[in-house]
Image (tube, grey):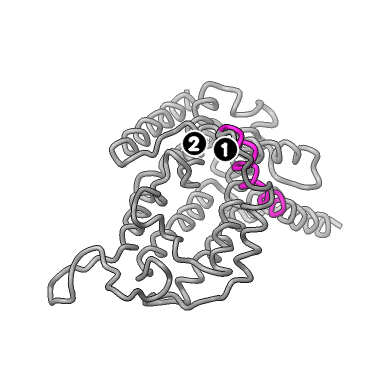
Amino acid sequence: MDFIYSLIAVIGTLVVAFIVSLFLPGLERKFIHARIQQRVGPPLTSPGIMAPLKFFFKKTITPESSMPRLYNALPLISLIVVVVILFFLIPDMYFAGALASVIALVGFLKVEEIMYMFMGSLSRSVLSVRMPFPDKARGAAHPEVHQSFFEDLSSLRAFRLIAFGSFPVYIAMFVAVAMTGSIYLQDIIAYQQVHGPVLFSVAGVLGAIVFFIGYMILLNEYPFAILKGKPDVVEGPYLEYAAKYRAYVYITRGFLMFTLATLFSVLFLGIAPNILNPTFIITLIVALLFPMLMAVFSAFSPIFTYKQFYPTVAGVSIIGVVAIIAALL
C-alpha cells in the first residue's frame, strides 16, 4: 500500500507539474507583459502549448554540426535533467539519500547550464543549415589561425553564466543549509515544520531576494538575458534548433520555471511537492507568483551589458553571503 501511495504521489506530482508548466510562459507574457505594455498579447496557451505543438509538426532537419545527433539531443537532455531535479524534490524520493540533497541539486542545475555551452560549441550555422558563405565571426582556413564561428559566442556566454552568473541561486540555496545544519531536504523540511519557515527570518528574506534574482538569471530573463541578447547578431545557443528539438526548448523553460519555484518552496517554506498533500496548493501558488513577479521586474528593466551584469551579480552574491552569515548566528 505504501508503495502504491508513493507511486501515485510521484507520478501525479510530475504530471500536474508538467501541465501547470505549460501555462507559465503564457501567464508571464499574457497577463503581465501584455498588460504593462497595454496590448492584447498572445493567448494564454500560445507560448507553452501551441508553440511547442506547432514545432512538433515542422520538418526535422539535420543541422550543420560536427555532431548533429548530440546537438539535437541536448534540449531533450536538458528537459530530462530538470525533470530529475523535480523528481528528487518529491518527499517520497527522499530515501535516495545524497541524491535528495542540496549538493546534488546544485550538481543537476549545473548540468542543465552546461547544456547551453555544448549547444554553442557544437553549432556551425546561425540558421541550422549550411550558409552560402562561411559562417565565421573571425579567422580563416589557414594554419595556426584561430577560427571562431558565430555560435562560439553563445558558448562563451554560457561559460560566463556557469562560471559567474549562477552564483546567486546557489548561494541562496545554502541559506537553508546554514540555518538547519543539514544538506538533506528531509532534514530541511523537518526543521521548518518545528521552527517555522526559513523565509520568516532576516536571513530567509535576504536569501529569498537572492534566490529570485538567481531564478531570473537561470531563466535568462531581462535584464539578465546573457544567453539571448537580442541586440546582437546571434540570439542565443538555441536559436538554430528546429522542429521537435525547438519544442523541447520551449517545454524545458516552462518546466524549469515550475521546478525552481518548487525548490524555493522546499528550502524557504518547508513545503515539499506532493499532489496527495493539501499543502501542494502552496507550491502551485509559488509557481504562479514567481513568473508574474519576474515579468513585472523584467518589463521595467533595461538589457544589461557585461559592465552592468558582473557588478549586479557580485552585489547580489554578497547579499547571499550576508544571509548565510545571518543564518549561522
Residue at the extreme right of the image, as rendered = 1
Q: Name the kind of residue labelled 1 in the image.
A: His
Q: Are marks 2 and 1 in contact (CB under 8 Å)?
A: yes
Q: Name the kind of residue labelled 2 in the image.
A: Ser
- x and y percentages locating residue 70 in the rendered image: 46, 74
The residue at the point 50 percent across, 30 percent down is: 209
The residue at the point 45 percent across, 55 percent down is: 113
Along the viewing direction, whichever of 221 and 14 lies nearer the viewer? 221
**Residue 274 falls left or right of residue 317:** right
Q: In this view of the protein, can residue 305 be seen by the observer?
A: yes
**Residue 94 falls left or right of residue 3:** left
Q: Which residue is mark 2?
A: 298
* Quarter of the picture holding the N terminus: bottom right
Along the viewing direction, whichever of 194 and 27 lies nearer the viewer? 27
Q: On residue 273, which mark appears?
A: none
Instruction: Tally the marks.
Output: 2
The residue at the point 37 percent across, 54 percent down is: 158
Q: Which residue is mark 1?
A: 33
The residue at the point 54 percent across, 25 percent down is: 205
The residue segment tinted magenta is 17-36
Along the viewing direction, whichever of 56 and 14 lies nearer the viewer? 56
Q: Is residue 207 above or below residue 329?
A: below
**What is the secondary structure assignment of the residue under circle 2?**
helix
Q: Quadrant of residue 145?
A: bottom left
Is residue 195 inside the magenta stretch?
no
N-terminal-most mark, 2 or 1:
1
Q: Is residue 218 above or below residue 322?
A: below
